[in-house]
Every structure is written in structure tokens, then in C-alpha cells.
Image (cartoon, rainbow, N blue to C red):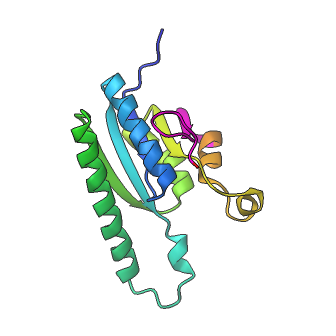
Amino acid sequence: MLQQYNRILVAIDGSKEAELAFKKGVQVAVRNNSSLILAHIIDTRAFQSISTFDGSMAEKANEQATTTLEEYVRYAKNHRVTDISYSIEYGSPKVLIAKQIPEDKEIDLILLGATGLNAVERIFIGSVSEYVIRHAACDVLIVRTDLDNVAKS
């Protein structure tokens, strides 16, 4: 029996890796006639280290995320995805992607772009994809290749 995915989450962070995951997510959604949910997480920890934070930085991040997500929605609709939505969340990307959003939206597949972190960066920063793989209750697909399954250069 083939796995049928009904609600697919793609984490979007503006990176090329996330764009690859999104484009593969579009293909999976079309093949499965699935809902596609895009999520951009604004990591609030990034603002905690800025002493002069006045709210405009979060507003600018939100505007940029909205612009990107609207472009992705148009792309998906042009590629026959009929049910697509997005959300912009504030908080820890790891927890929101691995637990909260999947529970709230009844997600059965999460797609993430492969991280470019090296071993030292993973020790200090931690990998979102590594956390999601370990803690998500649903299937997780880490995308490393383009639509022709060729590794990015």
C-alpha cells in the first residue's frame, strides 16, 4: 500500500534549501492531492540580543516573510496545488516545526531543506532539521536535491 499524505508542512526560511523543499513539497502535494501548509518562523531569540529592539525589526521580518510566502503560494497554484495556506509564527523554529504546528494542523509529512551547518556550528547553534527528525510524530523528509534529484552545488 502506498503512503497517502493529506497535510504537508514545508518550513520556509528564505534559504535556497527551503526553496528546494518547497518545490518538492508542491510535487508531493499534487501527487497526493494534499493540503500544503507553508510556515515561516521568526526566531524571537534573534531579537533578544539586540538592546535597541523597537518592534520595527520584527515588522520588517514579517513583511519579507509575507512577500516570499505570497510568491510561493502563486507558484504552487500555478503548479496545480489547490489547497495551500501559510502562517508566520514567532518563537522557537525547532519546537514549532516539530511539535506545535503539526499538532495544530494535523500534519502527516514535514519537508525541510537540508542545513548547511558544519559540525562545529551544529554544536553551538543546533540544527532545526536534526531536532525535527528526532521529535516530530509524523514523517519528515529532508530535501538535499533539486527537482531532477541532483544535489545542489
Along the viewing direction, whichever of 121 and 43 lies nearer the viewer: 121
Measuring from the top left, give residue 4's x and y in whole percent.
41, 20
Placement of 142 over or under 124, stated as above or below: above
Residue 64: quarter of image: bottom left
Range of magenta residues = 135-152
Residue drawn at (65%, 47%) of the image: 130
Q: Residue at x 35, y 23 (%)?
A: 32
| 105, 1: nearer the viewer | 1
Q: Magenta stretch: residue 101 in it?
A: no
Residue 122: image location, x then y, percent: 71, 58
Question: In this rendering, is residue 77 above or below 128?
Answer: above
Q: In the image, is residue 70 above or below residue 47?
A: above
Picture coordinates of residue 63 (x, y %)? Answer: 30, 69
Q: What main secondary structure does the magenta stretch of the protein show?
A: loop
Regarding residue 101, the answer to whether it shows in the image is no
Q: Residue at x 50, y 66 (%)?
A: 43
- Give the residue furthest to the top: 1
Residue 92 against residue 130 in the figure, above or below: below
Q: Is residue 109 left or right of residue 60?
A: right
Residue 62, position as x, y percentages in the image: 34, 68
| Residue at the outermost bottom position | 52
> Is 107 displayed left or right of 79 in the figure?
right
In the image, residue 142 lies in the stretch drawn in magenta? yes
Q: Is residue 73 left or right of residue 43?
A: left
Residue 10 visible in the shown view: yes
**How many numbered circles does the render carry?**
0
